[in-house]
Image (cartoon, rainbow, N blue to C red):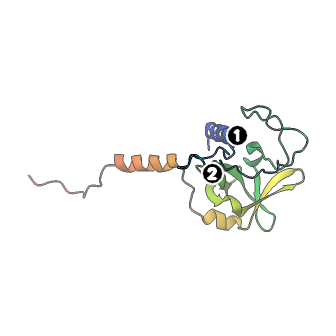
Amino acid sequence: MTNWSRLAMTSAIALALATPAFAQSTTPSPTTDPSSPPTQAAPTEPAPSTGASTTTSAGGTLTVQEDGQVLSSDLLGMKVVGPDGASIGEVADLILDDQNKIVGAVLSVGGLLGLGAKDVGVAWDALDVQETDGSAVAMINMSKEELAEMPKYKTLVDIKVEQQQKMSTPAPTTGTLPKQ
């Protein structure tokens, strides 16, 4: 993965995580009977706070990282270990769905010092992120060999490039000349 791609993905993740969540409106929906009283949602308890407010204005400005929140920079490049505790790769990228939720991770496995490594995709819930010796580590219940045997993860850009290459490749010839 190029540095530009990694920067773009990190920026996209940061933007997605910084986007405020909008609560469900308690404004009553219009009814056919205007004399019926409006219904309101039951009051809810505010979320527990660590003492500092993360949102300081209606614009959704975040000021403090709270307990339970993780920065994308802590996840990208994170070491991945197998069931035996041996290092088997690193998190190369994160996969977000259309709701901006992390649904998977692209792991860079195999190779030596990044050369010859292959990117494979796994579901996010297949990883168990833990803190070990002051840094985050993702544990997966698969061996290095199992991950190396998985097919390469293809991005939408990879698929588009493959399709363009197939369309631009000339049809194979039979090796015979046409009769005149």
Q: Is residue 179 visible?
A: yes
Q: Is residue 74 above or below residue 139?
A: above
Q: Locate residue 162 relative to residue 80 in the image: left or right.
A: left
Q: How many marks?
A: 2
Residue 104: x %, y % from top left:
65, 56
Amino acid bearing label 2: Ile
Residue 52: x %, y % from top left:
88, 38
Q: Nearer the viewer, mark 1 or mark 2?
A: 1
Looking at the rendering, in which quadrant would you find the N terminus? top right
Residue 8: x %, y % from top left:
63, 38
Q: Are marks 1 and 2 in contact (CB under 8 Å)?
A: no
Q: In terms of secondary structure, where does tag 1 sit?
A: loop
Task: Give the residue furthest to the left.
Answer: 180
Mark 1 or mark 2: name the one nearer the start of the chain: 1
CA distance for labels 1 and 2:
20 Å
Question: Between residues 102 and 57, which one lies in front from this camera angle?
Answer: 57
Q: Residue at x 17, y 54 (%)?
A: 177
What residue sits right under mark 1 in the picture? 20
Question: Between residues 155 and 88, which one lies in front from this camera angle?
Answer: 155
What residue sits right under mark 2 in the picture? 95
Q: Residue at x 51, y 46 (%)?
A: 157
Question: Between residues 6 and 44, which one lies in front from this camera angle?
Answer: 44
Dot 2, how many residues are within 10 Å of its Cα: few (below 14), some (14-19), or many (20+)? some
Residue 20: x %, y % from top left:
70, 40
Res 27 quadrant in image: top right
Res 126 quadrant in image: bottom right
Q: Is residue 37 above or below residue 151?
A: above
Q: Is residue 105 visible?
A: no
